[in-house]
């Protein structure tokens, strides 16, 4: 009976770990005109060169400087959603324990080749000035580039957009987290971001991983929501792990008790 219970328990534990992991590795299929096709685990070219706020050439590797890099794609004349994303970044940076510049870097990159370093500089000054927490100049860069470089990056990260009849852009929004080597670790959608989402994504990028660390307590308590691209408290996971631990402890108790009884019986004889 004990062997059967042990076998069932092991199979249940394996199923518990493997099944949630499958959804984490699922990727979108196809290439829409506008949208995001996640490229988790793929490596982008960190030597792609853009212009910084002063018009000087700079690569993604130079911006990263050996730290996880958060890439935000938008454009500086956007009439609506881009400013909400910039504000969302500014606000989450204020709330996180991780230090901008020290623990991670941010690159906001315009996908409009007509944007200029002057516009990038103005936009940067606007949001850095509003921040209640000091943001070092090299921690959050606002970049521009030519159409060839822009499209190479957007294709690599699976970011698709199009210019409309009003000479503006229809585009998705997401923060894209990459490791210092350029490996894509996580996408977080939306215009507002929670500190735990961003910090855990930074941790994944720092570990050069695009899958949650199964052994981490945080990853047990917080599951990744692929649809919302965020982390949420996973009560079922916690209960499941608690049940598994209890069953293991109970089986060990039964086995130990049985051995002690046998040992006493032999001693009595």
Image (cartoon, rainbow, N blue to C red):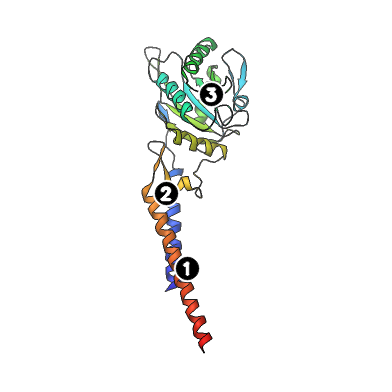
The correct choice, above or below, for 21 with respect to 130 in the image is below
> Residue at the spot x=53%, y=24% of the render?
107
> Residue at the spot x=51%, y=27% of the render?
71
**Earlier along the polypeptide chain: callout 1 or callout 2?**
2
Q: Residue furthest top?
A: 118
Is 144 positioned to the left or the right of 66 in the image? left
> Residue at the spot x=47%, y=26% of the render?
94
Q: CA distance from mark 3 to mark 2?
A: 32 Å
Say which residue label 1 marks.
252
Q: CA distance from mark 3 to mark 1?
A: 52 Å
Please tell me whether mark 1 sits on a helix, a strand or a loop: helix
* Total tally of numbered discs in the picture: 3
Q: Residue furthest bottom?
A: 269
Give the number of the mark in front: 1 or 2. 1
Please tell me which residue lies in front, 19 or 161: 19
Residue 47 % position (x, y): 62, 26
Give the number of the mark in front: 3 or 1. 1
Residue 107 is marked as 3
Residue 20 is marked as 2
Please tell me which residue lies in front, 269 or 78: 269
The correct choice, above or below, for 198 with respect to 241 in the image is above
Dividing the picture into quarters, in which one does residue 26 lie? top left
Please tell me whether mark 3 sits on a helix, a strand or a loop: strand
**Earlier along the polypeptide chain: callout 3 or callout 1?**
3
The correct choice, above or below, for 173 with respect to 230 in the image is above
């Amino acid at each position: 009976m004990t062997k059967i219970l042990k076998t069932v328990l092991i199979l249940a534990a394996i199923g518990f770990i493997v099944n949630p992991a499958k959804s984490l590795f699922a990727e979108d299929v196809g290439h829409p005109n506008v949208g995001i096709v996640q490229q988790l685990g793929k490596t982008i070219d960190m030597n792609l060169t853009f212009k910084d706020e002063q018009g000087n050439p700079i690569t993604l590797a130079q911006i990263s400087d050996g730290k996880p890099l958060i890439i935000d794609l938008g454009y500086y004349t956007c009439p609506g959603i881009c400013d909400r994303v910039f504000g969302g970044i500014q606000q989450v940076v204020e709330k996180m324990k991780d230090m901008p510049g020290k623990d991670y870097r941010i690159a906001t990159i315009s996908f409009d080749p007509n944007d200029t370093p002057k516009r990038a500089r103005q936009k940067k000054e606007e949001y850095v000035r509003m921040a209640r927490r000091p943001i070092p100049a090299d921690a959050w860069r606002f970049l521009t580039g030519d159409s060839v470089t822009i499209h190479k990056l957007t294709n690599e990260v699976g970011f698709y957009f199009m210019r409309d009849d009003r000479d503006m852009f229809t585009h998705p929004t997401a923060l894209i987290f990459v490791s210092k080597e350029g490996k894509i670790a996580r996408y977080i959608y939306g215009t507002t971001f929670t500190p735990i989402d961003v910090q855990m994504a930074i941790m994944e990028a720092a570990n050069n991983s695009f899958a949650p660390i199964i052994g981490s307590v945080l990853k047990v308590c917080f599951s990744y929501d692929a649809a919302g691209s965020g982390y949420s408290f996973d009560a079922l996971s916690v209960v499941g792990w608690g049940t598994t631990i209890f069953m293991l402890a109970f089986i060990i108790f039964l086995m130990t008790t049985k051995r002690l009884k046998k040992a006493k019986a032999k001693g009595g004889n």
